Image (tube, coloured by chain):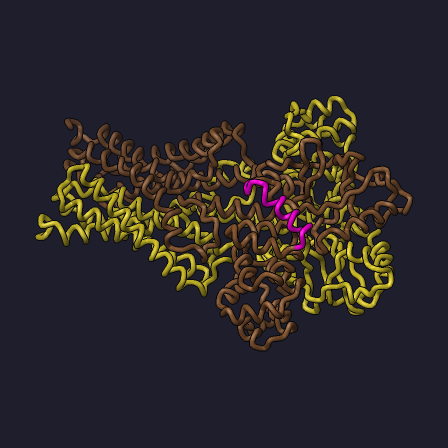
Chain colours: A yellow, B brown
Amino acid sequence: MARAAQPPATIELAQVLDRGTTRAVALWLEVVPDPVEREEQIAALTPEHLRVLDGLLDAETGEELVSTLDPLAAGELLIGIGVPTAGLILNELNTDLAADILRELPPDDRETLLSAVPADQALVLRGLLSWPEHSSAAHMIPDVLTVEAQSTAAAAIDSVRSGAAHLRADSQSGGYVYVVDGNGRLGGVVAFRALVLAPADALVADLMDDDVLAVSPLDDPEKSARLLLDHRLLAIPVVDGERRILGIITADAAADIAEEEATEDAERQGGSQPLDVPYLRASPWLLWRKRVVWLLVLFVAEAYTSSVLQAFEDELEAVVVLAFFIPLLIGTGGNTGTQITSTLVRAMATGQVRLRNIGRVVVKELSTAGLIAVAMAGAGLIRAFTLGVGWQIMLVVSLSLAAIVLWAALIASILPLLLQKTRVDPAVVSAPMIATIVDGTGLLIYFLIAKALLPELAGL
Amino acid sequence: MARAAQPPATIELAQVLDRGTTRAVALWLEVVPDPVEREEQIAALTPEHLRVLDGLLDAETGEELVSTLDPLAAGELLIGIGVPTAGLILNELNTDLAADILRELPPDDRETLLSAVPADQALVLRGLLSWPEHSSAAHMIPDVLTVEAQSTAAAAIDSVRSGAAHLRADSQSGGYVYVVDGNGRLGGVVAFRALVLAPADALVADLMDDDVLAVSPLDDPEKSARLLLDHRLLAIPVVDGERRILGIITADAAADIAEEEATEDAERQGGSQPLDVPYLRASPWLLWRKRVVWLLVLFVAEAYTSSVLQAFEDELEAVVVLAFFIPLLIGTGGNTGTQITSTLVRAMATGQVRLRNIGRVVVKELSTAGLIAVAMAGAGLIRAFTLGVGWQIMLVVSLSLAAIVLWAALIASILPLLLQKTRVDPAVVSAPMIATIVDGTGLLIYFLIAKALLPELAGL
């Protein structure tokens, strides 16, 4: 930040509240723009401090504060400062943010706050809360500016002006005005600025773009967000089956949705279930619950490796040196597979790779794996040589590495695409899952090659 | 999408071009909104088809097409259709997008296209291209609407109206107008709509918000994007040392930056270097280059496991059964560590966890690991029992699992935070890296516990 050029001494909110002036709170908001730092300082406040804060926040500074917080923290703050101020702030917030916050609260607290919001806005919020959480409609703001195609620019501005009185003051409409017909059906879009800059008697029909993308209320919010971001729009309308506008999703909400998706995918890729809460708010019990199921599933799957090794017990006893390379071989297989799935799963999440690309993906990955196999076979030869294990073991290790790399690449490139076909999120193909699959099968490959090449094992 | 309710038969661009009408191209844009599908169909065009396309694209449809494509694909298309049309389209595009596309092209092609853009816009583009690629300034659009604080609303609208004539038609300013003093220094921000809706004689100073966040041109673009997204702004100004506005970063550009960061982090987390190109455009050679270095580094690190096993060769020969559990034990350690780093690294990337939280993180993770250790020790006991290895080995396996889980948790929770302290991107603490670190040390733990508890190994 520009203003961080000479870093200001941080101000503690608790000290600001001891000062007890509205101006001091505004200054604090300016000096501490970081949401996480704000949350930490708020979490440290005593009930007395919260009462002081309640007296100092007006709708505007309250909105500026609450809109930056995580919905969970925002909900706690609103409950903490008490009903009248909380209602004012909720009324000032963008409607989608207010709904997000209310959604996170226990039903009792939600009702308490809703009762403090003006009736018309409470009705709108209840409408948003009635949509399923994982729907595009749950993320929209219902504040839409509409005009009719046959209006002149001047008449349209007047109509927007009177319509705007009913809308949130800071409604982030992205500056789009939507053009509807007499039945409220979406027919086009025009930039608010274009309306203002056009001659007063220009027809909206001539200013508008009639090719307007829209989404349905129950569409996957991640898909709607991606559509908006791909087309670099500042808003996308949500329309019902008759193409009547229910609301719009704005670019900042879409960025939020995409961020959350990326976080969930990152967590899944690490072999954990998504936390759904900010990390620092997650208790050890919650972390345990989200992690232990996958760990046990993977443990059971990995337990198979013990059976493979037990099956080759005679071979291991005859040539104990073979055991030295077990972690190296299966580790390399896991690493190769993880490199592929992490890149591929992300490319699928951002829409760059689809199921129909499976042929290209497999060919590309097997070609790459062929090149990598050569490098790893060479590295394996050198490592086995330095351990002084004899040329036959060297050959076994080297060939096994090459085979395991190719095998891991095949599994890792096909599995995420197959899962998507069965409508499972490919992000569940985590690094631990790939490593587990490759471990057992990699051992099989290793011992089969060893049996084929080592004369000592010929009779076993 | 709403319009996908009855999925339309997809239209091939090649067929559209055989039709040869502008209307058909517009229809294609409407039926095929998906950027990747557009890119694939464009990549399949012959030079003849590209010439036809050149004849059919005007500035507007060209902008609608090119703005959805990946910058690499967009650059190839512009070179493919030839200079005059490409210049028109580049002039129509948002300036930050045009600069992104030019940045990806070889210098010769870049000059060819720049020479086709009107001189004033070419100058602006060259200005953007002169900033380092990894700077906030490289992502800004220089089209900013400014007014002075002492203007009335009516005068401000007039000044914006005349200023707007020089700006891109679709400039996505987010509807903000910035308020500057006589020396061009940033003093506030006012919504364009607020200007229009205010009484004509209202002063801008009374309408504006004087607490405006700004960033410096050389600031890390990821930090600037996060600031904008955290505060749910539609644009954030880039200012020089004197707080004069150089341009703005818009919400859609910020979302793009955050998306790219998430993709790079996902690739790093898989133990690969970021590709920097869309997956389907990456050749096997490129994939090989981005992956093989880390694979070899990890191989060398993992090679240490062979030395550990060689050091315990006598123990292995005495109790070969110990080898059965090697993959299971080190696999579980790797999985435990990967779960932690994936969650933690993402929380750090989104700003939810900072270096100063290291104490809370370690306590939280070790508490969680304690709970997990109990579960895994139990699972290990059962698995060892089913293999019929005797109660002493059962005990060794079970205790080793618990110890390895705790050890992996300690490493995985500290390492990303320590790396951030040394200004290395914590995302390089990949799943493969954690697995590799835990493998060798986990084996040590296992054999030390075995030596302590197994009477057969007492003399070795």
Q: Quadrant of residue A238?
A: bottom right
Give the number of marks: 0
As drawn, is A113 to the left or to the right of A360?
Answer: right
What type of secondary structure mainly makes up the magenta span? helix
Residue at figure coordinates x 61%, y 67% from the top left: B29
Q: Is residue B123 inside the magenta stretch?
A: yes
Q: Nearer the viewer, residue A182 or B388?
A: A182
As drawn, is A258 to the left or to the right of B156?
Answer: left
Residue A132: tell me if it is visible.
no
As drawn, is B398 to the left or to the right of A243?
Answer: left
Residue B310: tell me if it is visible.
yes
Residue numbers of the magenta segment: B118-134
The spot of residue B278 in percent (x, y) is: 48, 54
Q: Is residue A338 inside the magenta stretch?
A: no
Residue at figure coordinates x 28%, y 46% from the top left: A376
Image height of B227 relative to B281, above or below: above
The spot of residue B178 in percent (x, y) is: 76, 41
Q: Nearer the viewer, residue B349 or A420?
A: B349
- Indicate the quadrant containing the N terminus of chain B: top left, top right, bottom left or bottom right: bottom right
Image height of B130 relative to B448, above or below: below
